[in-house]
Image (cartoon, rainbow, N blue to C red):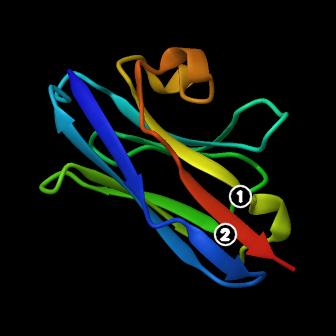
Amino acid sequence: QVQLVESGGGFVQAGDSLRLSCAASGRTFSYVVTGWFRQVPGKEREFVAAVSRTADVTIYADSVKGRFTISRDNAKNTVYLQMNSLKPDDTAVYFCAISPRGYGQAQAQEAYDYWGQGTQVTVSS
């Protein structure tokens, strides 16, 4: 069994930064990719970023490229999402998830087996 716990969300002004954390516990060794998704009420959950287990591959949604950085510390079993230059459109609940599948499916939520409970990010204009 795997547990994922997100933290670091909050209420910020446009242009500010936040760093989200996703702490994993349990049998995570077989999982290839960790991803971040976000969801606004009434909309589909959308892909934000993903990182490989060895951190040699990162993938970003076009909407966050150049502003968000995904990274990981395997010693702490934690994946981070550094979010800079935040915009009101970034307001959402952010979820982390892990997938045993390859990078080619990293943007598909169906590829992920375990999800965290989410952390709210609110960006005021």
C-alpha span from label 2 to label 1: 5 Å
In which image quadrant can residue 26 be found?
Answer: top left
Per the image, the residue denoted by label 1 is 64
Expressed as whole percent of the image width and height from the top left, the position of residue 7 reads 41, 60
Badge 1 amino acid: Val
Is residue 102 shown above or below 85?
A: above
In which image quadrant can residue 110 be found?
Answer: top right
Expressed as whole percent of the image width and height from the top left, the position of residue 72 reads 31, 55
Q: Residue at x 74, y 84 (%)?
A: 15
Q: How many marks?
A: 2
Is residue 106 shown above or below 110?
A: below
Answer yes or no: do the residues labelled 2 and 1 have beta carbons within 8 Å?
A: yes
**In terms of secondary structure, where does tag 1 sit?**
loop
Q: Is residue 89 left or right of residue 55?
A: right
Nearest to the observer: residue 40 or residue 55:
40
Badge 2 amino acid: Arg
